[in-house]
Image: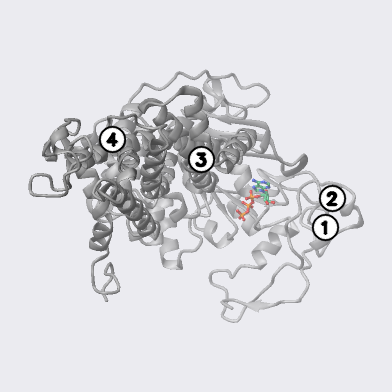
Amino acid sequence: MTAGHGRRGIPAGLRTALVALPLSLFAIAGLLAPVLAPADPAANDLAASLLPPSADHLLGTDQLGRDQLSRLLHGAQISLAVTAAVLGISMTVGVVTGTIAGYLGGWADRVVSRIIDIAVALPGMLVALAVIGVRGPGVENLVLAMSVWVWAPYARIARARTASLRGSPHLDALRLLGAGPARIVGRHLLPPALAPCLVYASTDVGAIVLGVATLSFLGLGIPPPQAEWGQMLIEGRPYLASAWWLAYPPGIAITAVVFASNLLGERLAAGAERPSILRWVLPHRLLTRAAGRAASRPPATTGAIAPSTMSADDRSVLQVRDLSVTYRHDGAQRRVVADVSYQIKRGQILALVGETGSGKTTAALAPFGLLDPTAVVTGAALLDAGDGARQLVGLPPHERRQINGRRVGVVFQDSLAALNPLRTIGAHVDEAVRNAGRGSRHGATRQVTEELLRLVGLPDPTGIARGFPHQLSGGMRQRVQIAIALAGEPDLLVADEPTSALDVTVQAQLLDLLARLRDELNMAMIIISHDLAVVTRLADTVAVMYAGRIVETGPFATVIGKPDHPYTRGLLDAVPRPGAPPGTRFRTMPGRSGAGPDDTSGCAFASRCPVALPACVQRQPILVALGGAHRSACLRQPGGPSLMPEAAVGRNGD
Ligand SMILES: Nc1ncnc2c1ncn2[C@@H]1O[C@H](COP(=O)(O)OP(=O)(O)OP(=O)(O)O)[C@@H](O)[C@H]1O
């Protein structure tokens, strides 16, 4: 058996086509009824009343002499039109409502979810009867009644799909590119929410056809003399014994549509056809063009603020002062970053290092509003120096969008999660290029895209642009992320663990690339890493973080060559050093990190520190200058003894 073939050797696509055949016939009959019908479905001929099937009337005639085949075909047309209208209305209302609720979260999501729950729980037929009872029979009211009946499951599916995507790095990446809520919802959340709804809709076709027929059968749907299948059933019922051809054909047609619709729904739900359905409905070029139009609008002007209490060096790209971040969950508050200050200049690389959970990512992304909405950020972060400096903390979203993706680019750790699996590499980079206001025409955009892919060292940019994320290696995907981040020609690039999960050779190549870009583009960079070996190759300055605070900072060579803080020494002792003789023992720090800045009144590292003083558990140390820009937050005298215990637990290379 080959991939894409069913159990009996029938290709998967052909099997789906076979399953879809009855519904296709239904659609063809409905669309071509006026052409295919041999007679006028409303033409009475009492002389030809109740004729059995014959060559003149393939399905016989009814009590008024009307041709049954013509009525069946026109009935398909009415069912198809009503079904299309009901699906169109209920899917639009359901998918848009569910997607917006899922995206917004919070109270809006809770309110919409309760409404959806109630709507799903109510018996649909009773709801439809109530609507028709109030508004009266008729085609329009039937469509309205059926829409009120069927919209809620679409809203529920779309809401669940969107909520599952809400916190994904892919959306973070889009926010960073400056995409606004309307664009994120319209372009990146509606399509994935629509895909499972389309699958569900294939099952719903049968339910709607049956519902319309039932309401007509009850005299509440399509009124006579229209040839509607439910209407035909009720008219044929008295003649079940004498003229079977009146009730059987519409009954069989309804059963076939319901059965085929359920079968097709199940087949599509198995997942085989979802992407192609999405493509039929939302041709990529259409989306791209719409996005291009939005992106080519001129950027909004933003007001620059004068630096207040901060002074910044002329070359300063970002200066952060007393930054604190607190998360609020269910009434509880937890500060995770406290009083962090750092500065980064053009052409420099700042490394933020520390164990997992020490607050590196939070401290680097907080200025750009890229944290969870529950984060409360205080302090100051100035982009640029001098009169044009702009305070980033508290910036309104529309002004932030002019900065993120243009002045600042971010490379995320998980390249697979940061890229949309359904879009090509070219589409990703194109979007970043257009967001940055470069290349408004498709051809020009793709040219810039290919230049960017070439700049980050990807061979065959044209071929790579046509590929999908899963077709590239991890290292290549990281290069794509770097290309996306460079699309706005940023002054600052933030790379969050850019080389984790890559093998050492690829790691080295990527680090060389970052160094080359820093030199060629004179960019400022913040590299976040828990691995000192990674930043050794790159960093000009380093800030070592522990429990949400910077505990040591300074020129990289000084901090690495002459570390002061016991935590920095511990970090250095725990990594194999280049050139160390084989068999050199390295040490791990006792205890575990994970503390927050406010979990103790003293030094957060005291419980793990081999040289802690009694005062360390009582007093919070502050950063003290040790000479030049080198500063350390330790209560011991600078340059005191490093007494890591001899409990070595590993060797280089273990
Ligand atoms: N959305 C959130 N809600 C609550 N706490 C959070 C949230 N995001 C992060 N934190 C907490 O903030 C602290 C700092 O997290 P952060 O991701 O900045 O650390 P990190 O040093 O970058 O770690 P890693 O290397 O694992 O990414 C951690 O204790 C983390 O649990």
Q: Which secondary structure lies at badge 1?
A: helix
- Residues at marks 2 and 1, CA–CA distance in whole angstroms: 10 Å
Q: Of marks 2 and 1, which one's residue comes earlier in the chain? A: 2
Question: Within 10 angstroms of label 4, few (less than 14), some, or many (20 or more) residues?
Answer: many
Which residue is the extreme one toward the bottom? 583
Please name the amino acid that badge 1 sits on. Answer: Ala
Camera-side residue of 649 and 145: 145
Residue that carries the numbered disc 1 in the rendered image: 606
Q: Are marks 2 and 1 in contact (CB under 8 Å)?
A: yes
- Residues at marks 3 and 4, CA–CA distance in whole angstroms: 21 Å
Foreground tag (1 vs 3): 3
- Residues at marks 1 and 3, CA–CA distance in whole angstroms: 64 Å
Residue that carries the numbered disc 4 in the rendered image: 78
Please name the amino acid that badge 3 sits on. Answer: Gly
Viewed as shown, does residue 327 lie left or right of 611?
left
Residue that carries the numbered disc 2 in the rendered image: 600
